[in-house]
Image: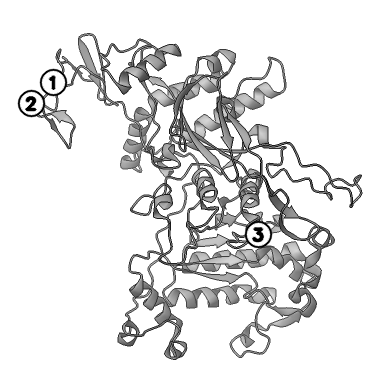
Amino acid sequence: HDSIITGPRRPSLSPLPRPSLSLPPSLSTRPSLTSPQTAEKPFSSFVSDLRHRFATLDLIYAWHAMPGYWAGVSLDSTDTAALNPRPHLPTPTQFVKEMEPGVQWDPVMLGGLGAIPNDKASDFYQGIHRYLRESGLDGVKVDAQGAMGTFGEGNGGGPELVRHFTSAMEGSVSDNFGASHCINCMCHSTENMYNYKLTTMARVSDDFYPRDTPSHTYHIAAVAFNSVFMGEIVNADWDMFNSKHDAAGIHAAARAVGGCAVYTSDKPGEHDFDLLRRLVFPDGSVPVALRPGRPTADCLFKDPTGYADPLASTSAPPNVAKPPADPTALKIWNTNRFGYVVAAFNLRGSAWDRRRRSYQTFEEEVSPVTAKITIGDIPAWAPTPAPGSAGVAGVAAAAQFESHFRHTDEVVVDSAADPAAAASAAELTHTLEPQLRRARRTSEGFGADSVAERVVVAYSHVSGDVKLMRASDEISVELGTRDYEVVTMAELTALTNPDSSAGVDVDVGAGASASASASANAHGVAGLSWAPIGLGNMLNSGGTVLRCVWVAWCRESTCTDMQGQRNEPTNQRTNGPTNQRTNRPTNQPTNEPTDQPTS
């Protein structure tokens, strides 16, 4: 990601060096991790045993709550005496009581907990994290952060206390693991989010509940809508899921377009590898989209669950049932390096019930919904509002920002201080020049003409269909219960000289190439054209395209390669055997171009 995104570089996930841990011989023959002998050994033995039993593990994190445990720290233990813990009765705000009445009879709220004074926060976290690091762990997930505001009474108030504890927690994580090895969780209070200075990842949803059937469709809606706001502050984490689960398909499709980490909570040995292979490469890397996934503009003010909340309107009596909302699909869009992706979901049938304080199924027989996917679902490709309207400047600005985000066209590097970086930046700019030129045209001359001229290739992952689309075209998909479709979009590019609008005369053979050419000609695209769809077996196929390079351009009697050298092309296509590594005919010199451009 980092090489073509302007702004701060994303932190590396390489762990800090950890102490060398040798596996005690007794552990290798121990029949169970839960045998009586295990409790007598240090935690480092348990971690060593995990690494021995699961040799391919790269990272192991520990999970703890921001107050220590969910009920704070022990008031009686000699291990916590130096922290001077005191009993505290948390006090939720009036707004929290209104939104979540059940918090008032939570055991912690009724019985209190052990709280650490502000001046001991740094010692508290350093003690936890140093112990975990020395035990061989690589990072932490810090949960229950939203509850810290309830500790504020008598301690300077919630916002001040949260600011202090967040700073201490982040400093300790950075010292012991590296700031990138922290997942912030249950942290939706603004006093949490506005205080992150070092850590970047945060959950944007409620938990994944494998046995709570009504929760799954609502989970997808929640992460998408919450990412509209939280995605501007943190790297959105859409939580784990089970790959072998009735709802695994929609969860996987959502992670593919979410721009988020992909991780599962599968029981070892119980995995759907066919599904996982569409998300993750064999080496464990993930084709992550570049931004947080968010609803398309036409979905922003619609409830995709179809739930009519009787408490949503103060004018409706509580005992009057409201009819379900009109059927609508949720569409989530995101950005790839050389295109975009839109996923559509049928999430109807269940939602969070504010009366029962739980997820409920309210529609047993879920009707199909129809999703209409268009070029306009992408902000940078959306039709321009009428001249003189207030929306023109906003749409043009969005297109300019989107183009700039995807293609670094102003890389400022001190060549004297870092010659290698300067050379890399120059190569990158040269490589992406065709795309940069289109991005400039989009942002500078954004209008009806530019939209009308754009032709996009749309690849539908589930159906396998490939379609050429203009602004007036749409893909209509009927989605049944928990159905989804993922559509990769990339702008069609003619194989022409980047400095010329002329086409390349290529002899298109029979078969798929001919039909593709005919389809392109039907859309007013002359000659041979292409679009970087990527690896079609991956849910986010466009995310697999890391780089597009003009290798050579040939026209008439000359050929110009990337270095600007001009060579005489051959006049006859070679049909002999090819070198598998270079994909060139073995009877043709590698420095002599063919009569067909390559990309």
Q: Which residue is mark 2?
A: 587
Which mark is in front, 1 or 3? 1
Per the image, label 3 sits on a secondary structure element best described as: loop
Residue type beneath disc 2: Asn
Looking at the picture, how far across and down is residue 465, in whole percent?
44, 30
Q: Is residue 581 above or below residue 9?
A: above
Relative horizontal placement of residue 113, taking residue 322 as reference (left or right): left
Residue 574 is marked as: 1
Residue type beneath disc 1: Thr
Residue 122 is marked as: none
User: Is mark 1 in CB contact (under 8 Å) with mark 2?
Assistant: yes
Per the image, label 2 sits on a secondary structure element best described as: loop
Q: Gap between marks 1 and 2, in whole Å?
A: 8 Å
Looking at the picture, how far across and down is residue 549, in whole percent?
32, 29
Mark 2 Cα-neighbour bin, 10 Å: few <14, some 14–19, many ≥20: few
Assign the C terminus to one quadrant of the image: top left
What's the residue at 83%, 59% (across, down)? Answer: 98
What's the residue at 25%, 24% (across, down)? Answer: 563
Residue 470 appears in the figure = yes
Q: Which residue is mark 3?
A: 187
Closer to us: 419 or 341: 341
Marks 1 and 3, the one that precedes in the sequence? 3
